[in-house]
Image: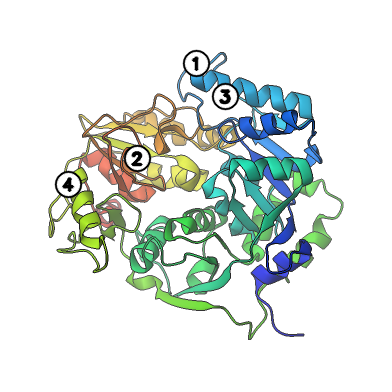
Amino acid sequence: MEPRTLFDKIWDAHTVKSVEDGPDVLYIDRHYIHEVTSPQAFLGLRQRSIGVFRPEKTTAVADHNIPTTDQHLPIRDAVSRAQVEALADNCRVAGIEYFGIGHHNNGIVHVTGPELGKTLPGMTIVCGDSHTSTHGAFGTIAFGIGTSEVEMVLATQCILQARPGRMRITVNGELSKGVTSKDLILYIISSVSTSGAAGYFVEYAGEAIKSLSMEARMTICNMSIEMGARGGLIAPDEITADYLSRIPSFNRNPEAVSLTENWLSLRTDPGAVFDRELEFDASSVPPMITWGTNPGMGMAVDGKIPEADQPGPGGNDSFLKALEYMDFKPGMKLLGYPVDYVFLGSCTNGRIEDLRAFASMVEGRQKAPGVTVLIVPGSQQVARQAEEEGLTEIFKRAGFAMRQPGCSSCLAMNDDKIPPGKYAVSTSNRNFEGRQGPGARTILAGPLAAATAAVTGRITDPRKLIRVCD
């Protein structure tokens, strides 16, 4: 048999039917839903008198609109309250598992799914949310879908989907001290651009990728779509198996051992051909920040904003527009630039490993005067773990308060908005105009760089504080 990629193995195993000169009918193993993109889908089912075909394959959480302080029902904001109540009602009628406000399993959908053992290697996974690619860290085909497709999956447990191209990004070498997986993916995106992987599903491989924790792998796969990819995935290995072995629900499965053995053989065959291949050296990746209004506008934390954008239709206009919005200049260094807000959280960097990293930098220090810091765990489980490990106490001694789980100011659909004109160092995934609030100026970074900004009040190279610690 001809050598196949990991992506093709999973895709082929889930293809119900191929439409001639058209898309494939792809079976979906796990469907995640939340309060923003599902109400219209359920309405469509009701209008057609169709029920949910396999409710046990769907898992729902409230995450986008929920508050992160005084988290209780009813939600004060009328729009948010209506969306969350609609999700609860729809799940109750359809018999769908739902983790709402106050539930011990509530959290961001792309954090709770993996930690509850609902995301497993070899699966196909969809959600009405662009960062569904997060789940690819487990060796899955996971991607975001639109509301009409949410309705399709609810009704049939299948989706019509054209097979994307295959791309492999190999990262060898070792990440330097003070450099995180967030820095690595920002570096890759800045190198290939926000459209550099358009039309492809990316497999990440190489020594540096294999050495990453599951939390770090989720960060990498989470931001795959920020370079235009349909999704990203990483072959399951012993690190994957160890992560899953610590999940009680998975260990109760009588087939856990045999499943794990099968997953460890789920990988790309030697000699399999990709449509495009790229290679990076992990040792050359610095701590990264963004200077513009898309994740591809990135640079080393101690670097300079480019003098000009890439040539091409509208390229320089976009470059100048981004600088005008951010009130920066070509050739400017941002090291030492004052910031107003710091946000640690989101489905990109709201896991326990991210809170640990942040805590390691702020321990023994104090929050900088005049900086507002939002520390938002990705789930109730992460919040409990932070408490048990003493991270919450470290934050408290340093002058920080940890909020309750939710998407928060990643997209500012609740009250956690950055005011107009203010600068926020954010561990989230997008720095679009107004993403964190109308007029907000977002500088993307990893948890270490965010922590240094929180205690210095300025953009600071995290490697400098690590040296002081040591």
Q: Earlier in the sequence, mark 2 or mark 3?
A: 3
Q: Which one is in front, 398 or 222?
A: 222
Q: What colouring method underlies this structural image?
A: rainbow
Mark 2 crowd level (few <14, some 14–19, many ≥20, 10 Å Cα): some
C-alpha span from label 1 to label 4: 35 Å
Quarter occupied by the C terminus: bottom left
Q: Amino acid at mark 3?
A: Gln
Q: Nearer the viewer, mark 4 or mark 2?
A: 4
Q: Earlier in the sequence, mark 4 or mark 2?
A: 4
C-alpha span from label 1 to label 3: 9 Å
- Dot 4 lies on which element? helix
Q: Residue at x 29, y 49 (%)?
A: 293
Q: Earlier in the sequence, mark 1 or mark 2?
A: 1
Q: Which mark is residue 363?
A: 2
Q: Residue at x 48, y 56 (%)?
A: 225
- Dot 1 lies on which element? helix
Per the image, the residue denoted by label 4 is: 324
C-alpha span from label 2 to label 3: 39 Å
Labels 1 & 4 near each other (Cβ < 8 A): no
Left or right of 416? Residue 240 is right
Mark 4 crowd level (few <14, some 14–19, many ≥20, 10 Å Cα): few
Furthest residue in direction right, as rendered: 254
C-alpha span from label 4 to label 3: 35 Å
C-alpha span from label 4 to label 2: 36 Å
Q: Amino acid at mark 4?
A: Glu
Per the image, the residue denoted by label 1 is: 78
Q: Residue at x 81, y 40 (%)?
A: 53
Q: Amino acid at mark 1?
A: Ala
Labels 4 & 2 near each other (Cβ < 8 A): no
Q: Which mark is residue 83?
A: 3
